Image (cartoon, rainbow, N blue to C red):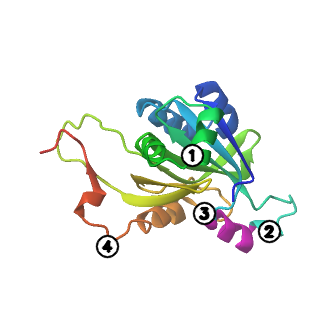
Amino acid sequence: MVDKFEVCLFKKETIISFFGKTECANSIINHLIACGVKSYIIEANYTDKDYLLDYQAYYSRSFKGLCRKTTRFHFFSKIFNVEHFNAILENNSTDQMKELQDEYLGFLVLKPIETSPGKKIIGRTVIKPKAYDDKFGSSIILSDKDMINLCGIPLSILGLQFQSQDRGTSACATMALWMANKKDENLPCDGFWKDPGIA
């Protein structure tokens, strides 16, 4: 159950204030803009399985008293407000649910940890790949289908899970292995996203 959610219009400056000014955050924000992001929902007090495992093994023993909950952001390519989202929750309309799914760009988990003041650590993230120009004409992006529950609304996104290293429990090699092992080997061939320019 979601303790609290907030519906917001996408503004780059506001998102930077949440994520911090890091190269990783900047790349994700620019990718979202290229995908046509218009709105986002902030899901507060979200329990993320991957962060909870790290918390149990490492962060729970920290003298900093770090929180075991995270914040999850959901991104959409349509402008809508809290009244519109509440109407979807109340009406439980199939058409509205489909519209929400069609506009869904993915999610990002923000850990309650900073590498330095104002520089947050990005947790489990899956964002829709965007089409791009491939001069070699042979790029294939490996992807997987992620199922998400937002306030009881089932959503899915096709992409590959990502999270940044945190220097505490996961260095670059650990994160590379974590991402590589997130791909579902049983996913059929349509689980591979191809650039539209590729035959």
Give left or right: position of 114 versus 22. right
Residue 142 sits in quarter: bottom left
First along the sequence among labels 2 and 3: 2
First along the sequence among labels 1 and 2: 2
The residue drawn where x is 64% and y is 62% is: 48
Mark 1 element type:
helix
| Nearer mark to the viewer, of 1 and 2 | 1
Camera sees residue 93 = yes
Q: Label 2: which residue?
A: 60
Per the model, the C-alpha gap separating discs 1 and 3 is: 43 Å
**Residue 159 shown in magenta:** no
Q: Do the residues labelled 3 and 4 touch (CB within 8 Å)?
A: no
In the depicted view, which residue is nearer to us: 53 or 106? Answer: 106
Mark 4 element type:
loop
Q: How crowded is mark 1: few (under 14 residues within 10 Å), some or many (20 or more)?
A: few
Q: Label 1: which residue?
A: 91
Q: Do the residues labelled 4 and 2 touch (CB within 8 Å)?
A: no
Q: Which three-letter amino acid code belongs to the residue tagged 2?
A: Ser
Q: Which three-letter amino acid code belongs to the residue tagged 1?
A: Asn
Residue 175 placement (x, y as % from top left): 52, 61
Q: Which three-letter amino acid code belongs to the residue tagged 4?
A: Asn
Q: Which three-letter amino acid code belongs to the residue tagged 3?
A: Ser
In the depicted view, which residue is nearer to us: 198 or 3? Answer: 3
First along the sequence among labels 4 and 2: 2
| Nearer mark to the viewer, of 4 and 2 | 4
Q: Label 4: which residue?
A: 186
Q: Label 3: which residue?
A: 170
